[in-house]
Structures are given as structure tokens and as C-alpha cells.
Image: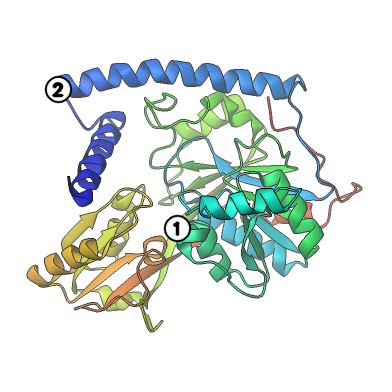
């Protein structure tokens, strides 16, 4: 049976399951899958509660590393726009004189081959070191080995160390010892309880804050909504500038005193894949373009293009973190040419997964997005200031607990 056929069917089933979770499918098969997912969700909820209870009662213990730790994460899976927030925060810390390391688990990155792990185990007494995506001066790994987000962060943040390891306690200790880092930023670390943060920055997507209210796998929640109380700051992402008092009331119900920072992902420019040429967003106005993406929320990406005045004549959507094949790209461009597109646009995260030597029949660009603070800019500066200039507190990672 051809591998491509198996891969296609697996992707179709995954998309079907996502549609059931998001309430976009009806019928007997969808209903049966929903019941099964609900049973699994109940089991997952029990595991989450037990884990938090064990940390809260110090049966399982976090491991302080003797430096400042900032946690950036969310309650849900999927695209809350976390990477641009991590980038903005790390850049602000770097610019204020901190020696920053970003610690990531490297989701969907390619692990080293088993023989390398085996050889390390028999020739060393300690654990293998984390993967160094950037040492602050050079980007050392590609997106396949690093993961999409760590590679993007490494490329966009010179002067910031980026490490990948599932064990972020180990990665943090390595960053301190090897690179002299004094500030650790845990990317997607809200559920990572072994390393306690002084500040917990929780991201909430205004367009879909908590999904259908169910935990995984029936919904998109990693832990219950009431765990908003563990946040030091809440970032409302993907804002259109309109205040959502109902959502803020939910946040205040569980965390009355939390600072809320509202932000938007703003398109900046187009950058051509291959030669790095930049174009103004005005180039989209009135143009017929094709768009493709493999992200959690492709609708928002396509909306950016339409709002800039582009006519989307062909779109192709893949699953989040989808690793494109040569055949996939050929299919995208064949559809674009047939639809009369003048050029093709993708996301920055998808662009890092494209082969560097790929030849395209049409110009291909990615859309660069950056975070714009709409409300609570003073609170953002305060959060950065608390880290850089702690008032009367030692420069360590003690602070509010992570498990409540």
C-alpha cells in the first residue's frame, strides 16, 4: 500500500476528528466519535487533577535553578499566537541587558536517530545535552531538527540562546552553565510543573478562548478554565480592538487581580522565499494570489491577506505542523497557476518547512507578523521590568507556585 495513500487517509481522519471537536461535523460517525472522545476526556481530566494535586502537596517537587524563570503558555492546544509573544518578550528582556535562553520541547521536531542515543548512553555517564538551536551568535539546527517555532525564534532573535529538550530542567541548567544565562523563558510551559516560574504569562485567543469547554481529546483544553488563577498576566491575543467584557468577566471570576494585556498580530511585510526580498503589504492590493498553510487557525492567516486587499483565487490547507512533501508543493503551485494567481503566500512558520532548494513556477512569499500591544502596554513594560529590576528580591526563580 503506497505510503502517500496511508498518509493521506491518516490526515483525513485527523481532520475529521478535529471537525468533530470543533462541532463542524454531524451524523452517526461523528456522534460515536464524540462519545468516545468524551470518555477519554474524563480520564484525561482525572490525570490532570491528580498531577496538580501531587505538585501542590509537594509529593512531586519542582526544581529551582537559581535564576529567573518566565513561563509563557496557554490552557488550550492550537494557535493562540504564542510564538510572536515569546519573541517580543525575549527581545525586550535581551534589550534590557538580560542574558536570555528560550527553552522549548521542540514539538514535532525530528529526534536524533536511535543509534546516536545508544552510542551516547554507552560512552557517557550523564544524560545527553539538549539540542542547541542557537548559541546566541549562530543558528545551528534547521527546522526539522529544532522544530518550527524554536527555529523561527532562533532566526529572529540574535543574542538569545534557544535550546530544545523535553526535560526543560536539564535544558535550563545547561543554559546557565554553558552560556551564562540569567533568565529562562519557557516556551509553551504553563503545564510544565517541574520548573517553577516567577511570572506565568497565559495566552487566551479572543477568537476561540476555551473551545467547547471540554478537556482533551473531546475539546481543546489542556486543563480546566478555573486554572486561569495560576496566571500572573493574561494576554488576550488576536484582538480586533473591541473589548470583550464577557470574556474578561470569566477571567476575573477565577483570577480577580490579574493584569490583562490585549494584543493583536499585525502583518508587517512579505518576504520572498529564496532570495529574502521584502515587499510592502501594498503589493497585495488588488492582486490575484494563492495561499497555503499548515497551522492551527488558517482562517486568520487568510483573513489578513483579504484585509490587505488581496483576491484569494486558490487556497490549500494542511494540518498544523504538516511536513510538506515535494508532491504537496507541486500540487499547491499547479492549483495556483490554474487559478491564475500572480504569486503564492504562506505563513512564516510554514516557510521554515519548505526545502531550501525548491524551484517554484511562481514567486513565493511568507507573511511576517509581529505583536502589537493594544491595551495594557504599561503592564507589559511592568512585567519586563519586574524581571530586569526586581524590587528588593534576590535574582532567583522563587515566586508564585505553578500548581494550584
Left or right, 167 with reference to 265:
right
Q: Is residue 393 above or below residue 404?
A: below
Left or right, 184 with reference to 158:
right
Disc 1 versus disc 2: distance between alpha carbons?
A: 36 Å
Display coloring: rainbow
Comes first in the chain, label 1 or label 2: 2
Residue appearing at x 23%, y 35% in the figure: 16
Left or right, 46 with reference to 359:
right
Q: Where is residue 40 in the image (x, y as percent from the top left)?
A: 40, 19
Q: Where is residue 359 in the image (x, y as percent from the top left)?
A: 26, 78
Q: Does the residue at mark 1 contact the one at mark 2 (Cβ under 8 Å)?
A: no
Q: Position of residue 57 (x, y in %)?
A: 75, 19
Q: Position of residue 8 (x, y in %)?
A: 21, 46
Kindly tell me whether residue 117 is visible in this rendering: yes
Residue appearing at x 43%, y 27% in the figure: 216
Residue appearing at x 29%, y 57% in the figure: 303
Return the residue found at the far left: 338
Q: Name the residue under label 2.
A: 27
Q: Name the residue under label 1.
A: 265
Q: In this view, does 273 lie above or below 64?
A: below
Q: In this view, does 225 lie above or below 35?
A: below
Which SS class for mark 1? strand
Which SS class for mark 2? loop
Along the line of sight, the residue nearer the viewer: 207 or 85: 85
Q: Quadrant of residue 349?
A: bottom left
Amino acid at each position: 500500500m503506497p505510503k502517500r495513500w496511508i498518509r493521506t487517509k491518516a490526515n483525513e481522519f485527523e481532520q475529521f476528528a478535529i471537525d468533530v471537536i470543533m462541532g463542524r461535523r454531524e451524523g452517526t460517525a461523528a456522534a460515536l466519535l464524540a462519545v468516545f472522545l468524551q470518555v477519554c476526556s474524563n480520564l484525561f481530566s482525572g490525570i490532570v487533577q491528580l498531577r496538580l494535586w501531587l505538585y501542590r502537596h509537594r509529593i512531586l517537587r519542582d526544581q529551582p535553578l537559581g535564576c529567573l524563570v518566565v513561563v509563557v503558555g496557554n490552557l488550550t492546544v492550537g494557535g493562540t499566537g504564542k510564538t510572536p509573544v515569546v519573541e517580543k518578550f525575549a527581545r525586550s528582556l535581551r534589550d534590557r541587558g538580560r542574558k536570555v535562553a528560550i527553552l522549548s520541547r521542540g514539538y514535532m521536531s525530528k529526534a536524533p536517530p536511535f543509534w546516536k542515543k545508544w552510542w551516547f548512553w554507552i560512552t557517557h555517564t550523564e544524560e545527553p545535552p539538549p539540542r542547541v538551536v542557537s548559541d546566541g551568535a549562530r543558528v545551528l539546527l534547521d527546522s526539522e531538527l529544532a522544530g518550527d517555532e524554536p527555529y523561527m525564534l532562533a532566526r529572529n532573535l540574535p543574542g538569545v540562546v534557544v535550546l530544545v529538550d523535553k526535560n526543560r530542567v536539564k535544558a535550563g541548567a545547561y543554559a546557565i552553565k554553558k552560556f551564562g544565562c540569567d533568565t529562562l523563558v519557557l516556551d509553551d510551559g504553563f503545564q510544565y510543573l517541574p520548573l517553577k516560574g516567577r511570572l506565568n504569562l497565559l495566552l487566551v485567543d479572543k477568537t476561540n478562548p476555551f473551545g467547547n469547554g471540554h478537556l482533551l481529546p473531546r475539546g481543546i483544553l489542556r486543563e480546566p478554565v478555573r486554572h486561569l488563577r495560576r496566571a500572573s498576566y493574561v494576554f488576550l491575543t488576536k484582538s480586533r480592538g473591541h473589548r470583550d467584557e464577557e470574556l474578561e468577566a470569566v477571567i476575573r471570576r477565577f483570577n480577580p487581580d490579574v493584569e490583562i494585556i490585549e494584543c493583536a498580530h499585525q502583518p508587517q511585510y512579505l518576504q520572498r522565499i529564496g532570495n529574502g526580498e521584502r515587499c510592502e503589504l501594498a503589493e497585495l492590493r488588488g492582486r490575484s494570489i494563492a495561499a497555503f498553510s499548515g497551522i492551527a487557525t488558517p482562517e486568520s492567516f487568510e483573513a489578513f491577506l483579504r484585509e490587505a486587499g488581496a483576491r484569494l483565487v486558490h487556497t490549500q490547507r494542511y494540518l498544523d505542523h504538516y511536513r510538506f512533501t515535494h508532491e504537496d508543493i507541486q500540487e499547491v503551485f499547479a492549483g495556483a497557476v490554474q487559478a491564475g494567481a500572480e504569486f503564492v503566500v504562506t505563513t512564516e512558520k510554514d516557510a521554515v518547512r519548505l526545502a531550501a532548494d525548491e524551484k517554484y513556477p511562481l514567486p513565493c512569499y511568507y507573511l511576517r507578523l509581529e505583536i502589537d500591544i493594544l491595551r495594557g502596554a504599561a503592564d507589559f513594560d511592568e512585567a519586563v521590568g519586574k524581571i530586569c529590576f526586581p524590587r528588593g528580591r534576590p535574582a532567583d526563580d522563587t515566586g508564585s507556585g505553578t500548581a494550584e
